[in-house]
Image (cartoon, rainbow, N blue to C red):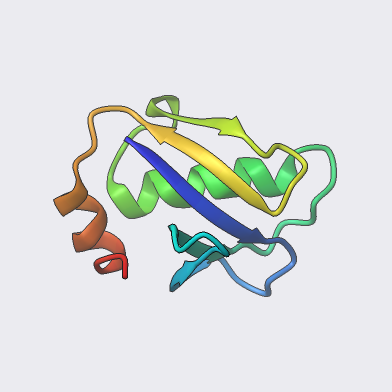
């Protein structure tokens, strides 16, 4: 499954903040991490947060696009919509 994420680095703590919609009406998950956006630290914190929240190994989660952008596309192996809804609520 591919999941769109809007990441906020230096957010104070690692947490999901619910769902939002982009300009085209596509849902994305809002996540903040305490790590700074330096040398991939925020991206690594995002992957670690998602792995813990979804009960998956970090190796099953990869960043597909948006390495330096705020809006990222993350691929999570063998994950269904119901598992996303259970962990973060249903997208709008």
From this view, report whether residue 54 is shown above or below residue 33. Answer: above
* Along the viewing direction, whichever of 28 and 38 lies nearer the viewer: 28
Looking at the image, residue 40 sits to the left or right of residue 22; the answer is: right
The percent coordinates of residue 83 (x first, y second) are: 19, 51
Q: How many numbered marks appear?
A: 0
Residue shown at 30%/49% (left/top)? 54
Looking at the image, residue 12 sits to the left or right of residue 53; the answer is: right
**Picture quarter with the C terminus:** bottom left
From this view, report whether residue 12 is shown above or below residue 10. Answer: below
From this view, report whether residue 5 is shown above or below residue 67. Answer: below
| Quadrant hosting residue 76 | top left
The percent coordinates of residue 55 (x first, y second) are: 28, 45
From this view, report whether residue 14 is shown above or below residue 43. Answer: below
Residue shown at 68%/71% (left/top)? 11
| Quadrant hosting residue 26 | bottom left
Residue shown at 15%/52% (left/top)? 82
Residue extending farthest to the right is 38
Residue extending farthest to the left is 82
**Picture quarter with the N terminus:** top left
The percent coordinates of residue 6 (x first, y second) are: 59, 58
Looking at the image, residue 40 sits to the left or right of residue 90; the answer is: right
Residue shown at 53%/40% (left/top)? 73
| Quadrant hosting residue 14 | bottom right
């Amino acid at each position: 499954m591919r999941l769109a994420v809007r990441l906020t680095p230096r957010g104070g703590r690692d947490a999901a903040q619910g769902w939002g919609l982009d300009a085209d009406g596509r849902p994305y998950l809002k996540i903040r991490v305490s790590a700074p956006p330096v040398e991939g630290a925020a991206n690594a914190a995002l992957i670690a947060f998602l792995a813990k929240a979804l009960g998956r190994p970090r190796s099953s989660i990869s960043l597909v696009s948006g390495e330096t952008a705020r809006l990222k596309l993350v691929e999570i192996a063998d994950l269904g919509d119901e598992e996303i809804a259970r962990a973060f609520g249903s997208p709008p």
